[in-house]
Amino acid sequence: MILEGITLNIEKQFIKYVFQNILGMLGISAYVLADTFFIAQSAGADGITALNLVLPIYSLIFAIGSMIAAGSATRYKICRAQNTRDYQLYFPNAVFFAILLSMGFVLAGIFIPDKILAFMGGDEEIIRTGTSYTRIFMLFAPFFMLNYIFNAFVRNDNNPSLAMVATFSSSIFNIVMDYVLIFPCHMGMSGAALATALSPVVGISICSLHFFSGRNTIPLVFGRPSLKKLLSSCQLGVSAFVGEISSGVTTMVFNTLILGIAGNIGVAAYGVIANVAMVAVSIFNGISQGGQPLLSDAFGRNEIRSSHRLLRLSIITASAAAALMIFIFNVIPEPITAIFNRENNPEMTAYAVTGMRIYFSGLLFAGFNIVGTGYLSATAQAGWAFATSILRGFAAIIVCALILSRLFGMYGIWLTVPCAELITAIVMVFAIVRNFKKSC
C-alpha cells in the first residue's frame, strides 16, 4: 500500500496528495468563474444576479453529495486500516443514498424552477432570465452527487492522480462547452446550464476507469442499503457538508440583505465576489481534502505523531496560500471586477472593489478553519467537527450579517465573513488543543 510507512516520507506524500487535490479543486472553481464570465457576456448583470440567486441550491446539492462522499470514504479508509470486515459496503451504500436523495431536486427542477427563483428573491425579469438555467442543472443533481462520491473513493483508494485528472477534465469540458453552447449555438443561459450539468458525467466516467485497473481495492459488491452506515458516515462528512452549504447560506443571507440595501446591482457585485471567493475556498478545500486520506490512515493505525505533523503541514500551507491571495485581491481588485462587468457599470465596480478588499481579509482565518475542521473529521472527532462547522457556516455568519449590515450597511456586509471566521478560529484553537491533549 502507498500509505504504509507513512512516518518515513510524510512530507513527500503530503505534497503529492495536496498538490494534486488543489489542482482538481481549482479546476472546479475555474469552471464556476468561466460560467460567471460567459453568462456576464451573454446576459449581463441580470444573468449574474440570476446565477447568484440560485447558487444556494447548487450549494445544497454539492453539500449533500460532499457529505456522503467525504464521510463514506473516510469511514472506508479508517475501517480498512483497522481491518473491519464491512468496509467494502460503504461505496455502494453511498451511491444508493445519493441517488435517492437527489430525486427531490430532480422533481423540483421539473415542476417549480420559476417558483424557486421567486422564493430566492428574483423579480419577473430575473425569473424570465434564469428559469431554464435552474431547471436544467437541477435535473442533473444525481450526477453532481455521484461525481463527489466517485472522486472521494478513488482518492482514498490511493489514486489521487486519477481523481485530479477527472476533476480537471470535467472542468475543462465545462469551460469549452460553456463557450460553444452560449455563443456559436446561441443557447444563452440554457447552454451555460447544460455545459455545467454534463461536466460531472465526464468526471464520473474518468473515475470509473479506476475500478477496472489493477490498483483498485474497492470491492464492487452490493448489499442491503444501510441507513445506519449512512448516518455513521455523515457524522464524519458533516464538515464537508457545512463547508459547501456555508457558501449557500452566506449567499442567501447576503442576497436578501443586499437587495434591501443596494438592489440588483449590489447583488451582481456580490455575485462577482462570491464566485471569486470560490477559488480561494477551493484551495483550502484542496489542502484539507488532500490531507484527509493521510490523516485517516495515520489515525486508523494510531500514529498520533504523524497526524499532528500532517495538521501542522496543512496549517502552514493554508496560511501561505491565504497571505498570497490577500495580497493579490488588495492589489488588483479593479481588473478582476472588470472581467465580469460587461456594461462597465461604475456602481457595480465601486461595490465590488470595496467589498473584495474587506471580504478577503478573512482568508487567513478561513484557511485555518477549513483545514482544522478537516483534521477533526479525519480523526473521527465528529462532535467538534460538527460544532466548528455549524459555527462557521451558519451561526456566526448569520448573526454577524444581521448586526453589521444594520450598523454599517454594505460595509457591514463585507465585514461579516472576516468577523465570523475570526470567531470560529478562536473556537477551533480550543478544539484542536483539546484533541491534542486527549490523544497524547
Image (tube, helix red, strand yellow):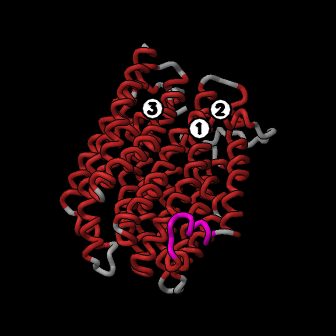
Could you tell me the amino acid type at mark 3?
A: Tyr
In the figure, 276 relative to 75: above or below? below
Q: Which residue does the numbered mark 1 point to in the structure image?
A: 71
Does dot 1 land on a helix, a strand or a loop? helix
Horizontal side of 317 relative to 156 (left or right) equals left
Q: Is residue 209 visible?
A: yes
Residue at horizontal 66 percent and vertical 68 percent from the top: 112
Horizontal side of 253 relative to 68 (left or right) equals left
Could you tell me the amino acid type at mark 1?
A: Gly
Mark 3 Cα within 10 Å, few/some/many (few <14, many 20+)? many
* Magenta region includes residue 54: no
Q: Quadrant of the N terminus?
A: top right
- Considering every residue shown, the one lying at the far top of the view is 440
User: Which range is magenta?
Assistant: 113-123
Q: CA distance from mark 2 to mark 1?
A: 8 Å
- Considering every residue shown, the one lying at the far left of the view is 331
**Contact? badges 3 and 1 (CB < 8 Å):** no
Residue 375 tag number:
3
* Magenta region includes residue 120: yes
Does dot 2 land on a helix, a strand or a loop? helix
Earlier sequence position, callout 3 versus callout 1: 1
**Contact? badges 2 and 1 (CB < 8 Å):** yes
Q: CA distance from mark 3 to mark 1?
A: 13 Å
Residue 439 x/y as whole percent: 45, 16
Does dot 3 land on a helix, a strand or a loop? helix
Horizontal side of 426 relative to 386 (left or right) equals left
**For the residues carrying marks 3 and 2, which lies nearer the camera in this image?**
2
Q: Which residue does the numbered mark 2 point to in the structure image?
A: 232
